[in-house]
Amino acid sequence: MDTPALQNHALPSTPKSWMNRLNVGQKITLGYVTTLGVAIAGTAGGVSIGNCHQNRAIERQNYSRTEAALLLQLQASVLQSRTHQQQLIPLSEFPDDFRDEYGHILKHAKTIQSTWDEIEAFLAESGQKNVAGHSEANVARFVQTYDKVPTSYLRTLDSLVTEIDPSSLNTPVKVAAAQQQLLAFTNGSLALRFDGISDDLDGLINEANAEYLDSPKFFSKFS
């Protein structure tokens, strides 16, 4: 019985045998192409990382700017409220001027409340987006420390003004008594606590401004 002749089967080319068939020029060209591909891939990765850091730095800078603006607005309203409140003392003998002065306080009271709410919302948003810096942590402690102080100060003042009723201050004795009440409130613990808001805001505003200015420096490390 004849043995069937073995058929020749060509083995598939391996990468190495395929490379062996290239001449020197082709191998050099392939090397250049491979090197260029690696370089492009590395550059693209670096650009992607750089863009990520840039976006984070810009976002951080925007948050610092918003934070500083809110704190400045709060401080201005607190200072204005306090100034107008102190002016109530000499104006107690002039009912119309007294009411006008107190009207300014009521306007600033609304700004204080709305700004306080905005600051709390800002802290929540910066925390959710994971862009909160060191200054936000200090602002959060500030909000906790002075929670309800503005409300208590303004409500107590409102009660005092209602009690005094400038339209009824028609004798020197009544005027003097009203002035003493207002002076006692001005120097009282609640008013001094209210003053502390403005004092503490100085440091927080400076810190927010510093973080705003440092954001480009942070970005420059990756650009």
Image (tube, helix red, strand yellow):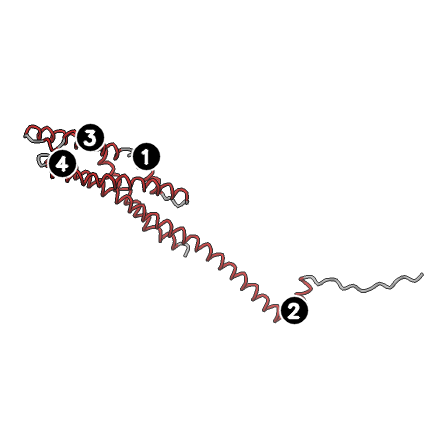
Q: Is residue 167 above or below residue 44?
A: above
In the picture of the structure, the residue carrying the numbered disc 4 is: 88
SS under mark 4: helix
Amino acid at circle 3: Ser
Asked if labels 3 and 2 touch by Cβ distance under 8 angstroms, the answer is no
CB of mark 3 within 8 Å of CB of mark 1?
A: no
Q: Tell me which numbered mark, 2 or 3, is placed earlier along the sequence.
A: 2
**What percent of the width, then of the height, locates residue 98?**
13, 37
Instruction: Give the number of the mark in front: 3 or 1.
Output: 3
CA neighbours of label 3 inside 10 A, class few (<14), some (14 to 19), many (20+): few
Q: CA distance from mark 4 to mark 1?
A: 30 Å
Q: Position of residue 62 (x, y in %)?
A: 34, 50
Question: Residue 144: which disc?
Answer: 1
Mark 2 to mark 4 CA distance (whole Å) = 97 Å
What residue do we see at 20% from left, 30% from top? 159
* Between 217 and 96, the one nearer to me in the picture: 96
The local secondary structure at tag 2 comes to loop
Give the Cα separation between the discs numbered 4 and 3: 14 Å
Report x, y in % for residue 54. Answer: 40, 54
Give me the disc on residue 159: 3
Mark 4 crowdedness (10 Å alpha carbons): few <14, some 14-19, many ≥20: many
Q: Which residue is mark 2?
A: 22
Q: Are marks 4 and 1 in contact (CB under 8 Å)?
A: no
Give the SS element for disc 3. helix
Of callouts 4 and 1, the N-terminal one: 4
Whether residue 116 sits left or right of residue 59 in the image: it is left
Give the label, 2 or 1, closer to the camera.
1
Local crowd size for mark 2, using a 10 Å CA cut-off: few (<14), some (14–19), many (≥20): few
Quadrant of res 19: bottom right
Residue 132 falls left or right of residue 47 = left
- Say which label, 2 or 1, has the lower sequence index: 2
Marks 2/3: CA–CA distance: 96 Å
